[in-house]
């Protein structure tokens, strides 16, 4: 059961109606194919960035606080996506997918065990999603963003983490529909 990994950007929280539309789409997709959701950090991670600027956090502290910010958003997403369940460890993903549920990953426990990313702001939830997609041998990775993005639209670490050959799409939320444009 090869999943599609969908990273839902935390910036959607600042766009009226975006989160509701994306969650509805993910719920519908989850009825058709195995889906693993990786949350962004959004305003939760933005607070960590602000604390880092103002209080001078160590790289390790800022990294783990930002990962925990993703966990917070995961709880919200699991509540709002029809048929979703929160998962906190890699071993729980397959069982939830086999049961037909959308697995929303709260990534801190998994990343504490693996810790594959540099502890800097160069690695964001985009890189976490790429790592998760590789670890799950996903068939594709979709990064849902709050708006049209320039360039490749990913963080600076992403290309060093994303597995070779993985189909990757960066999609603004208002173009994220069922079915996804790629097979």
Image (spheres, grey):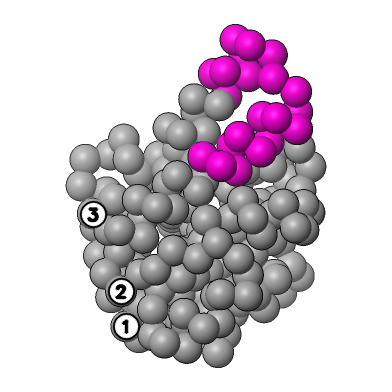
Residue 161 position, x and y percent, is 75, 57
- In the displayed orientation, state which residue is furthest to the top: 54
Tell me the SS state at disc 3: helix
Tell me the SS state at disc 1: loop
4 is higher (above) or lower (below) than 126: below
Residue appearing at x 76%, y 70% in the figure = 164
Instruction: Tell me how far mark 3 sits from mark 1, CA to CA.
Output: 17 Å
- In the displayed orientation, state which residue is furthest to the left: 17
Task: Identify the image quadrant of the N terminus.
Answer: bottom right
| Of 160 and 39, the residue lying toward us | 39
Say which residue label 2 marks: 83
144 is higher (above) or lower (below) than 168: above
Instruction: Tell me how far mark 2 sits from mark 1, CA to CA.
Output: 8 Å
**Mark 2 or mark 1, earlier in chain:** 1
| Of 129 and 70, the residue lying toward us | 70
| Of 61 and 133, the residue lying toward us | 61
Answer whether labels 3 and 2 touch (C-beta < 8 Å): no
**Mark 3 or mark 2, earlier in chain:** 3
Residue appearing at x 47%, y 82% in the figure = 97
Residue appearing at x 49%, y 25% in the figure = 47
Could you tell whether 174 is left or right of 59 in the image? left
Residue 175 visible to the viewer: no
Say which residue label 1 marks: 31
Q: Residues within 10 Å of mark 3 (few under 14, many from 20)?
A: some
> In which image quadrant can residue 52 be found?
top right
Residue 77 visible to the viewer: yes
Answer whether labels 2 and 1 touch (C-beta < 8 Å): yes
Say which residue label 3 marks: 20
């Amino acid at each position: 059961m090869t999943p599609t990994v969908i990273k839902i950007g935390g910036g959607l929280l600042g766009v009226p109606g975006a989160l509701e539309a994306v969650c509805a789409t993910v719920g519908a997709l989850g009825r058709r194919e195995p889906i693993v959701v990786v949350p962004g950090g959004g305003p939760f991670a933005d607070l960590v960035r602000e604390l880092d600027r103002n209080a001078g956090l160590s790289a390790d502290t800022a990294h783990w606080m930002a990962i925990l910010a993703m966990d917070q958003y995961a709880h919200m997403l699991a509540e709002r996506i029809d048929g979703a369940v929160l998962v906190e460890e890699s071993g729980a993903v397959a069982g939830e997918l086999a049961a037909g549920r959308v697995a929303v990953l709260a990534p801190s426990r998994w990343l504490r065990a693996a810790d594959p990313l540099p502890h800097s702001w160069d690695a964001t939830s985009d890189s976490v999603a790429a790592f998760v997609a590789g670890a799950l041998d996903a068939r594709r990775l979709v990064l849902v963003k709050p708006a049209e993005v320039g360039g490749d639209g990913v963080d600076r670490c992403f290309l060093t983490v994303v597995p070779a050959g993985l189909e990757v799409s960066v999609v603004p939320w208002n173009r994220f529909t069922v079915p996804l444009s790629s097979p």
